[in-house]
Image: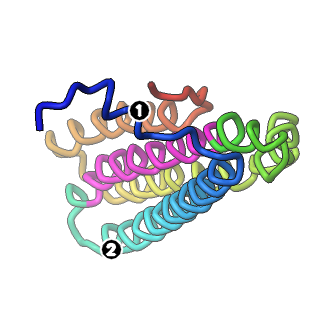
Amino acid sequence: MNEPIHSMTSEVTNPSSKEISDFLLAEYAKLRDEILKRTEIQHQLISLALVATGTFLAMDSVTAKLTYPVLALFLSIAWVQSDIRIGQLGMYIREQIEGRLGNIGWEHFYTPLRDLGKIGSLAHFASRGILCGTQFLTVLVSLLTTNFSTLDKVLLCLDSLVIILTIILLGPHKIKSEP
């Protein structure tokens, strides 16, 4: 029962090449599934932003309309978190899985094209445009209908800061692998 650790570890054998390949392929499949799920979450966040914009714009209260940019900021934070994680998963697949299997696979094919700006930039541009554009739209509509009460002025100033923060947040980011 009190067997030393070193004797217990001697029972573990070195995995065969086939076992390693099987493990890497299984891990690859799970990570690709996670990338797909996170992509779906990003699409849901964009849909939620569009529905929320319509809902806030339909409200009679200018003050309520002016609260939308704050909601959009948090939707943007969630979108960026998924985007960063997707990049990290892709980097891990490229370096730790495909690299060990002979530098083959989607990530090795896709990365040089993405780095040249040939793929992916329009999808990111569209998502960022929707998230920032809906903020601008609600503020613009609010500006056209407000009587500039003190609360509305405060919210307009807050919205200006929130929109700037959202633009910065949604700007290009360097993907770093986490330890």
Q: Which of 172 and 23 is in front in this view?
A: 23
Q: Which mark is residue 10?
A: 1
Badge 1: residue crowd in 10 Å (few <14, some 14–19, many ≥20): few
For the C terminus, the image quarter is top left
Q: In which quarter of the image is residue 52?
A: bottom left
Q: Position of residue 105 (x, y in %)?
A: 81, 51
The amino acid pointed to by label 1 is Ser
Q: Residue 145 at x, y = what percent?
A: 33, 59
Q: In this view, does 155 lie to the left or right of 16?
A: left
**Who's the residue at 53% across and 38% down the image?**
170
Which element type, helix, strand or loop, lies under badge 1? loop
Image quarter hosting the N terminus: top left
Callout 2: SS: helix
Query: Given the image, on which type of amino acid does mark 2 rest?
Result: Thr
> Relative to 95, is 49 on the left or the right?
left
Instruction: Give the total number of marks visible in the rendering.
Output: 2
Q: Which residue is drawn at 65% across and 46% down?
A: 16
Q: Is residue 24 left or right of 37 when viewed as pictured?
A: right
Query: Nearer the viewer's eye, disc 2 or disc 1?
Result: 1
Q: Residues within 10 Å of mark 2 (few under 14, many from 20)?
A: few
Residue at point 68% right, 43% down?
A: 97
Earlier in the chain: of badge 2 and badge 1, it is 1
Q: Position of residue 164 (x, y in %)?
A: 45, 32
Whether label 2 touches label 1, CB < 8 Å: no
Residue that mark 2 sits on: 55
